[in-house]
Image (cartoon, rainbow, N blue to C red):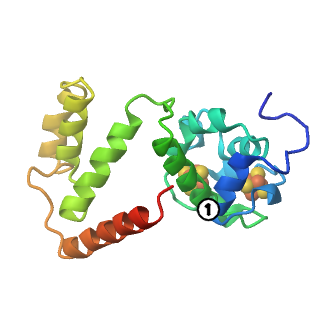
Amino acid sequence: MAIDSPITPLPSSEFRLFVERRSGQHILRCYQCGKCTAGCPAAYTMDIGPRRIMRAIQLGMKDEVLESSTIWLCLFCQTCYARCPREIDIPRVMESLRLLAATSGKRAAEKDIRLFHRIFLSLVQRWGRVHELTLGALYNLLSGHPLANATLLPRMLTRGKLSLLPPRVKWASEVKKVFDKVKAVEERAPL
Ligand code: SF4
Ligand code: SF4
C-alpha cells in the first residue's frame, strides 16, 4: 500500500490506537494539509516527512513508520505543532514512535542513529548537558569510524566551538532526578 493512498483509514488499526494512547493525540484529526512538513526544519533530511508519517499511521503502516529515519531525525522543535490547524502535537507522536521502535527491535533507516541517541542521552544524564567532544569521540569509536570528521577537530578547538573539558552544570543533579523518575515510570508501566 502506498502512503499517499486515498483509501479510508482502518478504524481499528492496532498500531494507530497504540500511538494515540501513548501520545494522547487523535491521529484521525489530521486532514493532510501538509503545513507540518512545509515548516519542518528537518524535513529535507527525512525519508518520510511529518505529513506522510501521519498518513502512514492512519493507514496502519507500522513497519514503514518504525523503520523510517524520520522518527529519529525529528528535533522536537514544535514548529509543526504550532502550525497544525488540527492542533496535533506531532513531536509527541514522534516520541511515541521512537519508544515503540526502540522496544520492538526495528532497524532504523538511518544507520547508527540509535547509537547516537543512546550516547547523547547518557551524557546528558551524567553531566546535565551534552559534551560535544565526548559525544563525537564515543560515536566515532562505537560506530566503527574512529577518524570520521577528525580533520575538523583542530579548527573547531581553536575557534572555541568545542570544549576539551566536560561541562559543569549546576542543575546536573536535577537532570539526573528526571532520568530516575522516567526510569521509575517505565518500570511501573512498561510499553
Ligand atoms: S499540519 Fe496537522 S493536519 Fe496538516 S498534515 Fe500536518 S498533522 Fe495533518
Ligand atoms: S518537531 Fe520534528 S517534525 Fe515537527 S517541525 Fe520540528 S523537527 Fe519537524
Please state, as top left, top right, bottom left or bottom right, where the N terminus lies in the image: top right
Farthest residue toward the left?
A: 165
Looking at the rendered structure, the secondary structure element under dot 1 is helix
Q: Nearer the viewer, residue 95 or 44?
A: 95
User: Residue at (48%, 64%) from the top-left corner?
Assistant: 189
Whole-percent x and y of residue 105?
A: 47, 36
**Residue 138 in view here:** yes
> Residue tagged by mark 1?
23
Residue 128 in the image: state x and y as whole percent: 23, 65
- Does 178 sit above or below residue 140? below
Query: How many labels were placed on the picture?
Result: 1
Residue 138 x/y as whole percent: 20, 38
Query: What amino acid is found at the position of numbered circle 1 in the picture?
Result: Ser
In the depicted structure, whether residue 112 falls above or below residue 53? above
What residue lies at 91% left-to-right and 38% top-to-bottom? Answer: 7
Q: Is residue 145 left or right of residue 157?
A: right
Q: Residue at x 27, y 45 (%)?
A: 119
Taking the spot 81% from the left edge, 56% from the top edge, the residue there is 28
**Residue placed most toward the observer, 187 or 44:** 187
Image location of residue 173, percent across then percent down: 20, 74
The answer to whether 158 appears left or right of 26 in the picture is: left
Tell me, yes or no, if residue 35 can be seen here.
no
